Image (spheres, helix red, strand yellow):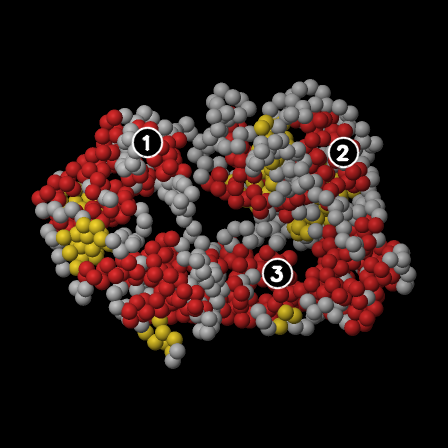
């Protein structure tokens, strides 16, 4: 008979097992078999046994099905053929059988013509067949006899599939093993002298019968972890969460149960002891050994967790990070927040994320998944560049600056498609055309049109940087390699051939892996092992790529990564792999209403859903038992967290029913601390024992003052000098504080241009305004369409004609004033009062400066033209300056001698220097009151408010001005401030503007 050892104290069970392992074996070469249910328990047990026995050698960790298959291999020379893969692919073929479609047309209609749906259904039915054999063996036995247990359509077509498969049922395999075991007792006893089953919480009758039969031949020991041995349950938590625990207890003789009480005088210890002794109610108050937080978001949950852990580590110097376990209901959702918060925190707490899916980190599998999910329809600019930005992919292709690649793709007007069609002009936004343009720009230093075929020409991309040019060749190689992968997806191959293709054509050429890295070698080995079954599978038929990808999704991409315990760091994991493992501090995140415990949902054809029986699988009951294990596993402290407050309206959100039951049991329905929305909330105070934070300091954002001004500018560009006087407030935020409120979207455009934005429209119209000859204008239109400055095809022509009409007055005025005189740009380089002003100024025709005012903003256009002409006069480069307005009217700009111009610039520089120290209280919008309005404080403040908020006549809001107004920066607006506005307006000659 098997030997049974039970306790709620896992360390006690580990010590018992360690003592048993010290017994001298009959055969020193025979392996000790230890069966566990999770990788986390295996890892913890290895460490526990090694620390107790000093050494752990010649052992084999397995799961229940794996050991059963090994026994089959020993007795029959092969593993059982009734495995999930054989079932799944057998069903995949059977579902395509015309006989099935004829007998069950409604079922066949679900997947008709869709191989992926057929494969997914085959996988679900294979799972059900596996469960039926464990939980409804009498039904499967009836099917073998042609008898249905219920008269419904779902059972009819499933029985047809089962009978047609001719698969040996698990029960038949078990009976055959039993008969062979009776014949080979000596062999089994010699190979497996001792088998230990440790910490398993789920047994089926099928497996228990096998191990009880095995116990008649060799030594079998069960180490069962249970919250208590006392029945029936009277404790409220046992009644609420202990359904599965009671089922497990009913399978064993618990006469040898070892109760180990928690000796501490804390609320957590009392809670555990009352569960252990099956007491009905909780006694005493709740201290800080049990804490809970209600937060607004998962990110705030992690921030509050960090504060909690750092406070513990600070107060208890005996506590180490390795003593802490953090579980999250959805580890893939919480892991990025954990990394972001803990990596950027002011005090480092070492941590290790375990159990997240293989695609949730910078891994070979993550890169592989991104590539294999990429299809022919995904060749848009953003999707291709985003794929290339994956670290392992960019490393493999040797591309160091993906930001540069992104900017080149944007500027080269690559948007979607590989080649596209010339007939609708989409060829100009495809990858082939764009890459040809980029590489020709590197090879040919020309701005002229270049033919690449009989009916296609391009303008070489001229902004290629020599230092990064090789990255552009690598980009081309990447796109071509990616295309070869997507082209192969239309083929059909056997599973083994798809596996070999993946290694040879995807992983090797596209994903970086270091042969000298242990982690990389381990991951590659894991990938190969995950798909090694394809070489053994008795299924040589070809399958579409979609089927192979679905297989990878289940076996590779969704599989959790290796569970790592005992790393010396805080362990962050999903709950199942670490359930019941004791830690001094246990934290549980994501205990949200509707998330935990999970709900049992059955497909309409799932015959298990028709009736629940004791021992059946239940996600809800399994999660409740897991929560009970969590309560018992925390040795000193328990921390629970959930999203309990609405970001939208601040209303409370109820927690998980498991938390609610716990709070009620403790007599503390409001146990959870309501954490503020932001980590920098003023609610956090050092003296508050319940609300505290280590993540944010007490600094406030204030404007720089004269006492702490930045290093003064000794030089400024012409562009920056002009922009300052156009909007000194925005200039201060941008250039001194480094703050930019403009929304910048780095996402690359993935569709053709339909409506150009204001900046693009201004850029094209500005260039058009300077083109006088009609043939040059037509050539510029063609170029704009090819380079993405105008919409494609006829819409581009319509848009261009509209622009031409809008600037007709400017073009006519320029033609009349400039004639055939060529335009030139003057390089300004002035040193005035210790400030160097340098940069180009264009629109100079011989000795005449002609500014073009494309917008209707008179003050802004005048200021720009006036300042540029003033710099030209100071440089002695012009004799006259005029501004052509959008309607064709011509304004004369003031004429200055070199000395007067330098004096005027010097006066403006005084205000410029003041505007470097703090925002200059000046705005072009507040310089010229309308007729009948006095220039006073009330009008100026009204003008500033309008600038900040915008209006219904096309004036956009100014977020920089809005910030200053909200900060009451202009309160009070003094007479000195008004005089400064008047003086700057005079220096800019705004009084001469009509």
Q: Secondary structure at mark 3?
A: helix
In the depicted structure, whether residue 99 falls above or below residue 752: below
**Residue 402 falls left or right of residue 771:** right
Q: Secondary structure at mark 2?
A: helix
Q: Hey, which quadrant is residue 760 in on the image?
A: bottom left
Q: Which residue is mark 3?
A: 552
Residue 975 in sight from this viewpoint? yes
Specify few, some or many for label 1: CA neighbours under 10 Å numbering under 14, 14-19, or 20 or more.
some
In the depicted structure, whether residue 263 falls above or below residue 606: above
Specify few, some or many for label 2: CA neighbours under 10 Å numbering under 14, 14-19, or 20 or more.
some
In the image, 356 versus 453, the foreground residue is 453
Discs 3, 2 touching: Cβ within 8 Å? no
The mark that comes first in sequence, 2 or 1, is 2
Q: Hey, which quadrant is residue 239 in on the image?
A: top right
Q: Position of residue 667 (x, y in %)?
A: 70, 23
Specify few, some or many for label 3: CA neighbours under 10 Å numbering under 14, 14-19, or 20 or more.
some
Q: Secondary structure at mark 1?
A: helix
Q: Which mark is residue 685?
A: none
> Whole-Å distance between the Cαs marked 3 and 2?
38 Å
Q: Which residue is mark 2?
A: 240
Q: Position of residue 89 (x, y in %)?
A: 71, 66
Please tell me which residue is depicted at 84% across the width and 53% down the height of the picture: 136
In the image, 622 versus 253, the foreground residue is 622
Q: Which mark is residue 939?
A: 1
In the image, 926 versus 587, the foreground residue is 926
The mark that comes first in sequence, 1 or 3, is 3
* Foreground disc of the pair 2, 1: 1
**Residue 282 falls left or right of residue 334:** right
In the depicted structure, whether residue 277 falls above or below residue 516: above
Please tell me which residue is depicted at 82% across the width and 54% down the height of the picture: 607
> Whole-Å distance between the Cαs marked 2 and 1?
70 Å
């Amino acid at each position: 008979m098997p030997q049974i050892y039970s306790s709620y104290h896992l360390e006690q069970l580990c010590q018992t097992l360690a003592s048993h392992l010290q017994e001298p074996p009959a055969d020193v070469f025979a392996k000790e078999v230890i069966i566990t249910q999770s990788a986390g328990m295996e890892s913890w047990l290895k460490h526990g046994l090694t620390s107790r026995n000093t050494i752990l050698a010649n052992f084999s960790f397995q799961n229940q099905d794996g050991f059963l298959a090994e026994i089959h291999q020993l007795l029959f020379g092969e593993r059982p053929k009734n495995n999930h893969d054989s079932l799944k692919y057998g069903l995949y073929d059977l579902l395509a059988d015309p006989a099935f479609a004829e007998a069950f047309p409604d079922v066949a209609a679900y997947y008709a013509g869709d191989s992926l749906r057929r494969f997914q259904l085959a996988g679900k039915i294979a799972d059900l067949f596996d469960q039926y054999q464990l939980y409804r063996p009498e039904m499967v036995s009836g099917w073998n006899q042609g008898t249905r247990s219920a008269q419904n359509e779902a059972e009819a077509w499933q029985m047809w599939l089962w009978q047609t498969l001719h698969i040996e049922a698990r029960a038949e395999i078990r009976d055959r093993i039993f008969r062979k075991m009776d014949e080979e007792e000596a062999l089994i006893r010699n190979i497996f002298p001792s088998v230990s089953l440790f910490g398993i919480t789920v047994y089926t009758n099928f497996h228990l019968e096998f191990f009880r039969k095995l116990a008649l031949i060799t030594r079998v020991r069960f180490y069962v972890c249970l919250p208590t041995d006392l029945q029936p349950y009277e404790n409220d938590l046992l009644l609420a969460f202990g359904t599965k625990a009671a089922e497990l207890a009913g399978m064993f003789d618990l006469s040898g149960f070892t109760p180990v009480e928690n000796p501490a005088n804390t609320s957590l210890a009392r809670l555990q002891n009352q569960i252990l002794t099956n007491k009905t109610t909780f006694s005493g108050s709740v201290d800080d050994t049990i804490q809970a937080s209600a937060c607004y978001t998962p990110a705030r949950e992690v921030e509050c967790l960090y504060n909690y852990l750092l406070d513990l580590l600070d107060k208890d110097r005996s506590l180490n990070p390795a003593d802490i376990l953090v579980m999250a209901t959805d580890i893939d959702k919480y892991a990025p927040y954990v990394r972001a918060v803990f990596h950027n925190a002011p005090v480092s707490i070492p941590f290790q994320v375990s159990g997240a899916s293989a695609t949730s980190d910078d891994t070979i599998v993550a890169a592989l998944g991104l590539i294999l999910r990429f299809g022919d329809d995904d060749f848009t600019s953003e999707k291709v560049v985003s794929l290339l930005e994956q670290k392992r992919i960019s490393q493999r292709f040797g591309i160091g600056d993906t930001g540069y690649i992104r900017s080149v793709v944007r500027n080269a007007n690559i948007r979607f498609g590989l080649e596209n069609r010339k007939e609708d002009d989409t060829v100009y936004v495809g990858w082939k055309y764009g890459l040809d343009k980029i590489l020709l720009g590197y090879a040919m230093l020309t701005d002229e049109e270049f033919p690449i075929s009989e009916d296609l020409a391009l303008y070489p991309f001229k902004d290629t940087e020599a230092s990064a040019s090789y990255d552009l060749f690598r980009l081309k190689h990447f796109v071509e390699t990616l295309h070869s992968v997507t082209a192969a997806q239309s083929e059909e191959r056997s599973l083994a051939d798809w596996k070999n293709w993946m290694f040879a054509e995807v992983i090797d050429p596209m994903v970086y892996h270091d042969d000298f890295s242990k982690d990389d070698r381990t991951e590659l080995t894991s990938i190969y092992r995950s798909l090694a079954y394809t070489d053994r599978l008795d299924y040589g038929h070809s399958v579409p790529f979609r089927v192979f990808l679905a297989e990878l999704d289940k076996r590779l991409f969704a599989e959790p990564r290796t569970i790592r315990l005992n790393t010396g760091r805080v362990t962050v994991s999903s709950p199942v792999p670490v359930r019941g493992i004791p830690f001094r501090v246990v934290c549980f995140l994501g205990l949200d209403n509707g998330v935990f415990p999970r709900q049992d949902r059955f497909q309409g054809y799932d015959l298990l859903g028709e009736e629940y029986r004791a021992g059946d699988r239940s996600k809800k009951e399994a999660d409740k038992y897991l929560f009970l294990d969590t309560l018992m596993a925390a040795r000193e402290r328990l921390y629970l967290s959930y999203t309990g407050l609405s970001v939208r309206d601040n209303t409370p959100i109820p927690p998980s029913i498991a938390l609610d039951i716990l709070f009620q049991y403790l007599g503390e329905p409001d146990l959870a601390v309501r954490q503020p929305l932001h980590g920098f909330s003023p609610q956090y105070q050092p003296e508050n024992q319940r609300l505290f934070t280590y993540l944010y300091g007490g600094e406030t954002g204030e404007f720089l003052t004269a006492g702490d001004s930045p290093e003064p500018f000794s030089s400024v560009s012409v562009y920056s000098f002009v922009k300052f006087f156009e909007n000194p407030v925005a200039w201060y935020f941008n250039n001194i504080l480094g703050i930019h409120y403009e929304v910048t979207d780095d996402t690359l455009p993935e569709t053709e241009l339909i409506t150009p934005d204001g900046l693009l429209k201004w850029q094209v119209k500005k260039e058009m305004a300077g083109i006088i000859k009609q043939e040059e204008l037509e050539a510029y239109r063609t170029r704009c369409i090819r380079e993405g400055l105008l919409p494609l095809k006829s819409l581009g022509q319509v848009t261009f004609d509209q622009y031409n009409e809008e600037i007709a007055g400017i073009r006519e005025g320029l033609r009349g004033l400039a004639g055939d005189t060529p335009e030139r740009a003057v390089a300004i380089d002035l040193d005035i009062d210790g400030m160097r002003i340098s940069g180009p100024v264009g629109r100079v025709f011989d000795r005449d400066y002609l500014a073009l005012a494309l917008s209707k903003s008179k003050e802004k256009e005048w200021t720009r033209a006036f300042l540029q002409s003033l710099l030209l006069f100071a440089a002695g480069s012009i004799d006259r300056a005029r501004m052509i307005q959008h309607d064709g009217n011509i304004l004369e700009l003031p004429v200055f001698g070199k000395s007067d111009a330098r004096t005027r610039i010097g006066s403006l520089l005084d205000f410029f220097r003041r505007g470097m120290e703090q925002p200059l209280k000046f705005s072009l919008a507040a310089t010229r009151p309308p007729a009948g309005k006095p220039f006073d404080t009330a009008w100026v403040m009204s003008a500033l408010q309008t600038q900040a908020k915008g209006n219904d006549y096309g004036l956009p809001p100014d977020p920089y001005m809005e910030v200053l107004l909200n900060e009451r920066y202009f309160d009070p607006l003094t007479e000195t401030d008004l005089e400064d506005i008047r003086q700057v307006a005079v220096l800019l000659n705004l009084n001469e503007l009509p």
